[in-house]
Structure formats: C-alpha cells, structure tokens
Image (tube, rainbow, N blue to C red):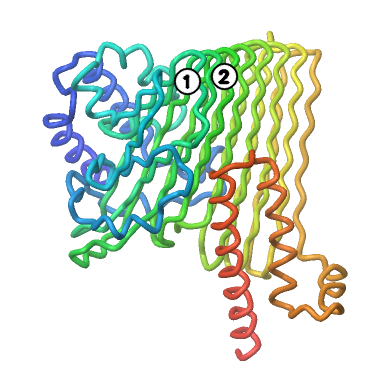
Amino acid sequence: MATQELTTYQQGFGGFEKSAAGNRLAWLRSMRRDAFARFAEVGIPTTRMEDWRFTNLSSLAQTPFCLARNGRGSIAARAIDQFKITGAACQLVFVNGHYAPELSNPGKMPDGVEISNLATEIESQPSALESWLGRYLDTKRDPFSALNTAFLEDGAFIHIEKGVVLEAPIHLLFVSTAESGPTMTHPRNLIVAEAESQASFIEDYISLPSSAGAEGRLFCNTATELVAGDNAVISHYMIERENTDAFNVSTLRIEQGRNANVASHSVLLGGGIVRNNVHPVLNGEGGDCLINGLFAGTGRQHLDNYMLVEHAKPHCGSRQFYNGILGGHAHGVFHGRIIVHKDAQKTDAKQTNRNLLLSDGAQIDTKPQLEIYADDVKCTHGATIGQIEENALFYLRSRGIEESAARQLLLLAFASECLDRMAEGPARTHVEGLIHDHLTHLIRASANGKASEAVG
C-alpha cells in the first residue's frame, strides 16, 4: 500500500481507537488492531488481484477520506419520511455510521426480539457480543472487511430468540451526508436469528446533501454478519441507491445452520462505484440458500457483484440468479464463485447471470466459477448478454404503445424475474416501486443519450 494512502488511514485509526466504544475491552481492541494490520498489509485492491480484475479503485485509493465522527443532528426528520417503508415492523436510522434515535422508530417488538445499536451493546453487554462479533467475517481474504473491522463501532444489533416469528420486516436505513471533505463510514451489523426463528431484514443505503451545503465525496464500507440457526427461515434485502458520485462497498457474510433457509436479495440502483459481496457458508446439513439480485445502471456507474458460496456440509442447495440492466457507459460485473468442499456430498448448486445492454457504450464482465472437491454433486452455471428483443418491441408498438413505454414494459418484465423470487409483503412492494421508478429514469436517460448521439 502506498505510504501516502496508508498514512491517511493510520491517522484516522489512531484517533478512532482512543475514543471508540469499547476501547477498554482487550478482545475488541485486539480485533481492531489485527484487522487494521491486515488492511495495511494488503491495502486497497487493484486490478492485479483476481477478485478485483474488473474494478479499478484507483480513484478511491487516491482520495484522502476522513472518518465521519459526527453529523447525527444535521438531518431533519422530515427528510427521512420519504424513505419509510409501509408495513415495516420498525425503522432504525444511522447517519454517517452512527445511530440516530431521534430519527428512528423502534416500534413495539414481540417478546424474544432484541433490536439495538452495536455501540450501545458494546458498552452494556460486551460479553454477550464476544461469541458472535467478528467470528464469521473473513478479514484475511477481503481487505475491505478488514478495514470495516478496524473501524468497527456502530450499526445494527438484532437478536431473535429460538422459535420467534416476526411477520413484518425490520428496516435499517443508512444515511450518508457530505461533510467538509471526503468522508468515510464503516457501519457494522450483527444479526443473530436462533433456531426455528423467522424474520426479514432490509438494509437500505442512501445519501443526502448536508444541511451545511458541504460537497465532500462519500465512501460507505459496510459489513453484516448474519447467523441463521437450525431450521431458521430468513430473508435479507440489500438496497443501494446512493448518489452517483459515492463509493459503496458492502459485505454480507451468512452463516447457516442445519436445514436453515436463507434468501439474499440485492438491488443496486445508485452509487458511482459499487461493490456488492455476498458470502454464505452452508455449514449445516440440509441448508438452502437463494442469492437473488438486480443491478441497473446508467451514465458511468460501475456496479460489481461478487458472490462466494461455500458448501461445507452435505445435502445443501444454493441458487444464484442475478440480472443486470445497463445503459449509457455503465459497467457491470458479475463474479459468481461456488466452492463445494470435500464433505459436501449431494450438493445441488445453480448459478445464472442474465444481462441487457441498452447502449453501445454499456459493458458487462461476467465470470461464473465452480470449484468442486466432492464427487457426488449437481452444479450448473451460465450467463447471457443481449439487448431488448426487437420482435417483442415491434409487437408492442404495433399495438399502439409508444416506444419508450414499450421499452419500459420489457425492462419491467426482465426485472420481474428478480421480484418474483421475493416473498409477498412490504419488502417486495417497496422494492417493486423503487425498480419501477428507476427503470423509468433509465429509459429516459437512454433515450436522451441516443438523441445526443444523433445530433452529434
């Protein structure tokens, strides 16, 4: 790592460590220091690293980010109203990585459900956290997970006891606001769903202008450890819709017990450079995992999806379905990797990536990958890249439908493949509205781009 780049992070870490929640806890202090040492050793990934070969992070590496340590009171409650989800059980709001109770609505949870923020839990019951926090995230393999762990302090803490069924989703809203210069945040979430529990979680990432009018660049590096106990049924939604000049790196690490059923749904609509990591480990026999996603970009957005699915025990199934829609000069990446370990006999794994390019300048790199060390498995993968079907467009237009409306209908049908894999309820309804609005914008942007090219 370049000396100048490292100095920026070292200075930030030195000040953070002295004042961070739990700085007197030996186990937490050691975890943070070990993670920072690992990050300092590896640094910001480059395209020479295989897992990052399609994503150039030089602009991020060259930006001198400072850690956000305040800003919770800079947003009015009315600015958050538009991001509420109808039917959610509660909404916890985090501004620049810190819990904002004045903007949150904890709701009334049933017995057996504990919802709090991590900084509070670190101070009030650190011994309970020690057995879970940091146990699953792979800081050795991923430098951004190491960076997040080094600056670990606040985020959501959710604990659902055995057998508890939560009907409505829990909404976690993460707001980034510009400060006086380039600002970085490292939200850390810990979700523990014990055996036979059922719940849904929505992580929603947005960015807002500062009330003071600051215009610094934003870098949100978030990580979530999700533990699904035996026979648990869990749905997790990741929604990224920050401003298009923001950097966003998110990592979801899932640990699945015996017969646990987990669905991960990712919807990437915003951000300038976005990296979405999903890493489930099926560590109990009979587990099932669905990894479902949609990424849609235009302009010069870069949307990178990295899926690492580990089958560690026998009789488990995993399904990956990711659809991409790209216009303008947007660049999409899908890297799906399935590892079937030696003991994971009777594995059934499927991986599919489908992409639509709406312009000549749009680009997609797709890399399905299988590593199989067991001999009794069923694994398939495939990828397609195409454009809107002209015959279908002609058919709709011949029925009197305007071209832009016809294109939108076809894109919505393509996106609906992702929606159809979501369970009915408030989360799906919310995501459907976001996708509809975004595709309307994308079609208009694509049409304006073509018009500009024709004039030129």
Q: Residue 407 location, x and y as percent?
A: 72, 70
Q: Residue 7 location, x and y as percent?
A: 21, 42
Seen at 79% across and 13% down, the residue is: 375
* Dots 2, 1 in contact, CB < 8 A: yes
In the image, what residue type sits under mark 2? Ala
Seen at 28% across and 42% down, the residue is: 97
Q: Is residue 442 visible?
A: yes
Instruction: State the image quarter where residue 74 is shown.
Output: bottom left
From the viewer's perspective, is 385 left or right of 28?
Answer: right
Instruction: State the image quarter where residue 282 is shown.
Output: top right
Residue 230 lies, with reference to residue 273, above or below; the image says above
Quickly name the residue at label 2: 232
Quickly name the residue at label 1: 193
In the image, what residue type sits under mark 1? Ala
Residue 438 lies, with reference to residue 364, above or below; the image says below
Quadrant that contains the N terminus: top left
Badge 1: residue crowd in 10 Å (few <14, some 14–19, many ≥20)? many
Seen at 37% across and 21% down, the residue is: 134
Q: CA distance from mark 2 to mark 1?
A: 7 Å
From the viewer's perspective, is 70 left or right of 186?
Answer: left
Q: Is residue 247 visible?
A: no
